[in-house]
């Protein structure tokens, strides 16, 4: 799950075009997001983002990887919603006991 969290952070940074905005969106610190993306880049052996003091831009490798990962995250969220919705919809047989006089006018 650790790698999945790193991917979520990467996608958030790319979508927000900012480490700060991504950190706020994910309710974590900016430094945590930065560290996690650096770990992900080291794991993959490729630079995903170009960073300057003023802006963040996606490398070509980062663009390819982020697009595919965004699709995976979207599918994962759809799967979660499907299960959650199933839990909130009533399922099964409902039996009601009532006296005979209940149905008589």
Image (cartoon, rainbow, N blue to C red):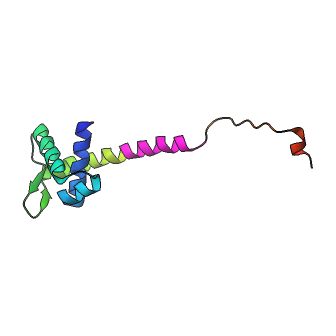
At horizontal 23% and vertical 56% (from top left) the residue drawn is 22
88 in the magenta segment:
yes
How many numbered marks have been drawn onto this rendered protein structure? 0
Residue 28 percent coordinates (x, y): 24, 51
At horizontal 28% and vertical 56% (from top left) the residue drawn is 25
Q: In the figure, is residue 75 to the left or right of 95?
A: left
Q: In the figure, is residue 76 to the left or right of 100?
A: left
Residue located farthest toward the right when viewing the structure as drawn: 105
Q: Quadrant of the N terminus?
A: top left
Q: Out of 3 and 46, give the one closest to the viewer.
A: 3
Q: Is residue 91 above or below residue 17?
A: above
Residue 33 percent coordinates (x, y): 18, 49
73 in the magenta segment:
no
Residue located farthest toward the bottom when viewing the structure as drawn: 54
Q: Out of 40 and 100, give the one closest to the viewer.
A: 100
Quadrant in the picture for residue 56: bottom left
Quadrant in the picture for residue 51: bottom left
Q: Magenta part mainly helix, strand or loop?
A: helix
Q: Out of 51 and 96, give the one closest to the viewer.
A: 96
Residue 82 percent coordinates (x, y): 47, 43
At horizontal 45% and vertical 46% (from top left) the residue drawn is 81
Q: In the figure, is residue 34 to the left or right of 28?
A: left
At horizontal 13% and vertical 41% (from top left) the residue drawn is 39
Q: Which residues are magenta?
A: 76-90
């Amino acid at each position: 799950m650790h790698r999945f969290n790193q991917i979520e952070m990467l996608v958030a940074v790319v979508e927000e075009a900012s480490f700060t905005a991504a950190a706020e969106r994910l309710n974590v610190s900016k430094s945590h997001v930065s560290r996690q993306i650096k770990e992900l880049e080291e794991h993959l052996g490729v630079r995903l983002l170009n960073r300057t003091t003023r802006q963040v831009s996606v490398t070509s490798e980062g663009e390819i990887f982020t697009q595919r990962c965004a699709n995976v995250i979207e599918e994962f969220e759809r799967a979660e919603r499907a299960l959650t919705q199933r839990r909130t919809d009533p399922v099964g047989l409902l039996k009601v006991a009532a006296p005979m006089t209940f149905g008589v006018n």
